[in-house]
Image: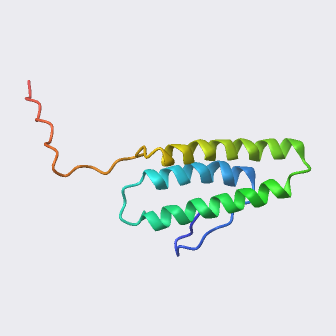
Amino acid sequence: MFDKSGQWIHLETFDDFDNGLSELIDLWSSTSKTATKTVKESALAHFKEDLEAAALKWIDNRAKSKKYASIGEELAEFEEVLKEGSNVAPAADSNAPAAPAKKKA
């Protein structure tokens, strides 16, 4: 999706999209300081743009069109989770008490 310099790498093949969707979900689940809301939203927008382009490219190929439609369905499910406000990976609460240490036997 993004290279080391922060540039978007366009997705073209089905495998790119399949792996990219997993990476997108991981990015949205990340609590890393580099995974800002802006970066997450940008990745989602780029992914959707590339998927739309791929779907249009393969509109006359029924088999490939179905494969890209399945990625679109998974993306829609993921977006629904985001819209519902369900935190994919809530940030850790630094004020929460730590679990007590277990006594050694």
- Colouring convention used in this rendered image of the protein: rainbow
Residue at the image point whose x is 69% and y is 45% from the top: 71
Q: Count of labels shown? A: 0
User: Which one is in front, 95 or 76?
Assistant: 76
Q: Position of residue 40 (x, y in %)?
A: 49, 61
Specify the farthest residue to the right: 60
Q: Work out whether 74 lies above or below 1.
A: above
Residue at the image point whose x is 85% and y is 53% from the top: 58
Quadrant position of residue 47: bottom right
Residue at the image point whose x is 62% and y is 47% from the top: 75
Q: Position of residue 8 (x, y in %)?
A: 61, 69
**Left or right relative to 43: residue 96:** left
Residue at the image point whose x is 88% and y is 43% from the top: 62
**Left or right relative to 36: residue 103:** left
Q: Position of residue 68 (x, y in %)?
A: 75, 47
Q: Is residue 11 visible?
A: no
Q: Work out whether 59 lies above or below 104.
A: below
Quadrant position of residue 1: bottom right
Specify the farthest residue to the top: 105
Specify the farthest residue to the front: 84
Q: Work out whether 7 lies above or below 90.
A: below
Q: Is residue 12 visible?
A: yes
Quadrant where the C terminus lies? top left
User: Which one is in front, 6 or 4?
Assistant: 6
Q: Position of residue 18 (x, y in %)?
A: 66, 48
